[in-house]
Amino acid sequence: MSGEADYLFSTAQFKYDQVLFPGMRIRPSDRDRFDRMRRVEWMDMESVQLRRCLMVGAGALGNEVLKCLVLSGFRDITVVDMDEIVPSNLSRCLFFREEDVGRAPKAQVLAERASSLDSAVTIRPVVSRIQDAEDWDFDIVLGCLDNISARLHVNSHARYHGAPYVDGATDGLSGKVHTVLRDGPCLQCAMNRSHMKVLERRYTCTGREATLYSRPLAAEITTTSVVAAMEVREALKIASGREDLCVREVMYYDGMSGSIEKVELDVDPGCPNHGDREAIA
């Protein structure tokens, strides 16, 4: 662009900005919603915006994860959840309001509200159990679940379809994030007899359609926010083509001390998810 053309463009842009933002001088870098993210050396925003994401669970963790996904530039997101909104959700769920209680399913309300953060994003709500889902054509899967059975279902299907899976969980002031990549240990590799004993235990708000309903776990928003941010940061690495930067260990967060510990996990040679594809379909 010549000097004269550049001057005319800058003048026209300035006049346009004055209409939208009277009295403000908008710098060119401030016109790009994701300018600050592009300044992260390894971040590939074009790639992030093209990735199809599946988020399973629309409760407290799901609210925070979806917020971070949309604000981070992910534009194609499917949300799966079967539950309804109850009053106890309101202290930990950014997108839920008092008038939503009994109005509509979590996934639907979450998709409606989160879409207002960015007009370019498409969020599809699916009101059902993840076990009933048939579409697994996604680039990244994020888990925000409350029971082991559903986690293992998502884990096995994500591995079978070749999609990296980022699983998050909270319990009071503690949390965990496990990133399951194509060449690493999966959730089932970490299972033991204690996990199998409570396989169907579900800490849902309503207790609906649970094989074994248990009293809800302690929870609060600050721990939920931290774990959600950790999940989406791993998803950003994957979407940017930098799986080499992902945390290969299981991350445990202690909200009381503010510490994070990483525990190494090996592939279990007996895990069915690491055998033939036909064996884990």
Image (cartoon, rainbow, N blue to C red):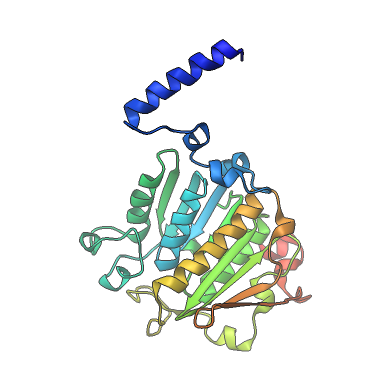
Query: Could you tell whether 278 is left or right of 113 in the image?
Result: right
x 54%, y 78%: residue: 258
16 or 71, which lies in front? Answer: 16
Residue 280 placement, left or right of 68 = right
Quadrant placement of the N terminus: top right
Q: From the top left corner, tell me how far across and down residue 197 is, in percent.
A: 55, 87
In this picture, residue 225 sits left or right of residue 238: left
Q: Residue furthest right?
A: 269
Q: Nearer the viewer, residue 166 or 129?
A: 166
Q: Residue at x 24, y 60 (%)?
A: 100
x then y, percent, for residue 213:
39, 82
Query: Residue 109 occupies which quadrant of the picture?
Result: bottom left
Question: Which residue of the protein is positioned furthest toward the left in this rendering?
Answer: 99
For the C terminus, the quadrant is bottom right
Q: Is residue 261 above or below residue 226?
A: below
Q: Is residue 51 visible?
A: no
